[in-house]
Image (spheres, rainbow, N blue to C red):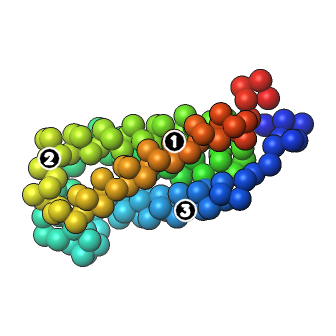
């Protein structure tokens, strides 16, 4: 996006709150991802209990890739929002879809509720709902003309 395209568009005050909160949320998610990826057993046990170690030991590589997409898109979305970039919406949608796939597959096939417990499961469902709300926010501000149009 060039400076010409950004003229005339103002960042609403709430965009800053959404972007900062989203970035903070996904920094925590990135930390989880990295510590689980490197098999930090102390962290996994502290966060998820003994079942967490068993759960993440043989976590399927395809699901790790989907999780990586979720985390990367979740970290990128607020940066794009602050830049008023039109790609904020597709990126937020990618994070939402990836989170939805993770939840659906892990609950259906990896016995997530039993392995990680109700609190972790509800927390992750909340992350999925929050991510979908962020995508909805991106759509709303896109329709209001805050984000750059494809012609910009």
Q: Nearer the viewer, mark 1 or mark 2?
A: 1
Residue 72, x across and y down, in percent: 49, 48
Residue 144, x across and y down, in percent: 69, 37
Q: Quadrant of the N terminus?
A: top right
Relative to 77, is 115 above or below? below
Nearer-the-camera pick, 142 or 38: 142
For marks 1 and 2, the one nearer the N-term is: 2
- Determine contact: label 1, label 2, CB under 8 Å: no
Q: Is residue 77 left or right of residue 3?
A: left
Locate residue 152: give its quadrant: top right
Circle 1 is placed at which residue position? 136
The residue carrying pointer 2 sits among few (fewer than 14), some (14 to 19) or many (20 or more) residues within 10 Å by Cα, namely some
Q: What residue lies at 17% left-to-right and 46% top-to-bottom? A: 107
Q: Residue furthest top?
A: 151
For marks 3 and 2, the one nearer the N-term is: 3
The residue carrying pointer 1 sits among few (fewer than 14), some (14 to 19) or many (20 or more) residues within 10 Å by Cα, namely some
Q: Nearer the viewer, mark 3 or mark 2?
A: 3
Q: Nearer the viewer, mark 1 or mark 3?
A: 1
Nearer-the-camera pick, 43 or 132: 132
Circle 2 is placed at which residue position? 110
Q: What residue lies at 48% left-to-right and 37% top-to-bottom? A: 93
Relative to 54, is 108 above or below? above
Can residue 71 be seen at all in this image of the molecule?
A: yes
Question: What mark, if any, has residue 21 been given in the picture?
Answer: 3
For marks 1 and 3, the one nearer the N-term is: 3
Q: Is residue 66 left or right of residue 23?
A: left
């Amino acid at each position: 996006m060039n400076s010409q395209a950004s003229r005339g568009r103002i960042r609403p005050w709430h965009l800053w709150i959404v972007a900062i909160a989203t970035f903070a949320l996904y920094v925590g998610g990135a930390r989880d991802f990295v510590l689980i990826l490197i098999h930090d057993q102390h962290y996994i046990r502290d966060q998820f209990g003994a079942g967490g170690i068993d759960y993440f030991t043989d976590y399927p590589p395809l699901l790790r890739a989907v999780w990586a997409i979720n985390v990367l898109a979740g970290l990128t979305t607020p940066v794009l929002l602050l830049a008023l970039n039109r790609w904020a919406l597709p990126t937020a949608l990618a994070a939402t879809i990836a989170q939805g796939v993770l939840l659906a597959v892990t609950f259906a096939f990896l016995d997530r509720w039993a392995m990680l417990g109700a609190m972790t499961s509800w927390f992750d469902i909340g992350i999925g709902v929050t991510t979908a709300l962020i995508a909805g926010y991106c759509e709303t501000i896109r329709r209001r003309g805050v984000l750059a149009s494809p012609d910009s």
